[in-house]
Image: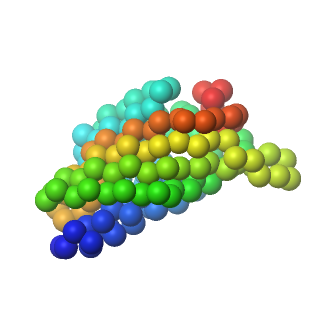
Amino acid sequence: MSVLEDKDAIREVMAAYCHALDACRFADVASLFADDGIWTTDYGEAKGRAAIEQMLCNIVPAKGEGPQRKHYITNIIIKVNDDSADSISDYLVVRESGPHLIPVMGGTYKDKWVRQDGTWRFQRKELVHDISGDMALKNNR
């Protein structure tokens, strides 16, 4: 693959992460990580696919359990180095609030990537909450 193809493949995984997370398909989110991948933020950390899936189940309300949300990623910078890469991007989370939508989180994703068997996966995904409101998560964030 060329560097441009690698960057495009990484962006596809980033988009798949948002789509799966917003649909509450937590096993699909976890499958985007390396076997020993890490998902970390200021309110918790999980290592490994099973732990990542469980953490998301414990934090994010599924449909019918609370307001639903959408994640948007922009300002993506990716640096590829053979079978590893680093990326930084900004994200915005919007959630339901009665008949309205409200922005509830803006932050930075700091991601480390690894290519395994030809597929790019998150080695480490760090969520930095630069600005936040009421996310209506199960952990009262």
**Residue 14 x %, y %:** 42, 58
* 72 in relation to 107, above or below: below
Would you say 22 lies left or right of 37 here?
Answer: right
Residue 141 point in image, percent of width and height = 63, 29
2 or 36, which is in the foreground? 2
Quarter that holds the N terminus: bottom left
Q: Residue drawn at (25%, 40%), measured in percent from left and top?
A: 36
User: Where, by quadrant of the figure, is residue 123 drawn?
Assistant: top left
- At 59% from the left edge and 49% from the top edge, which residue is drawn? 92
Residue 77: % across, % down: 36, 56
The residue nearer to you, when weighing 113 against 58, is 113
Tell which residue pokes out farthest to the left in this image: 82
Classify residue 26 as left or right of residue 12: right
Q: Is residue 19 left or right of residue 27?
A: right
Above or below, 119 against 34 in this view is below
Is residue 78 shown above or below 110? below
Q: Is residue 140 visible?
A: yes
Spot the residue most to the right: 99
x and y, in percent, of residue 129 in the image: 53, 35
Kindly tell me whether residue 49 is visible in this rendering: no
Asked which quadrant contains residue 44, the reply is: top left
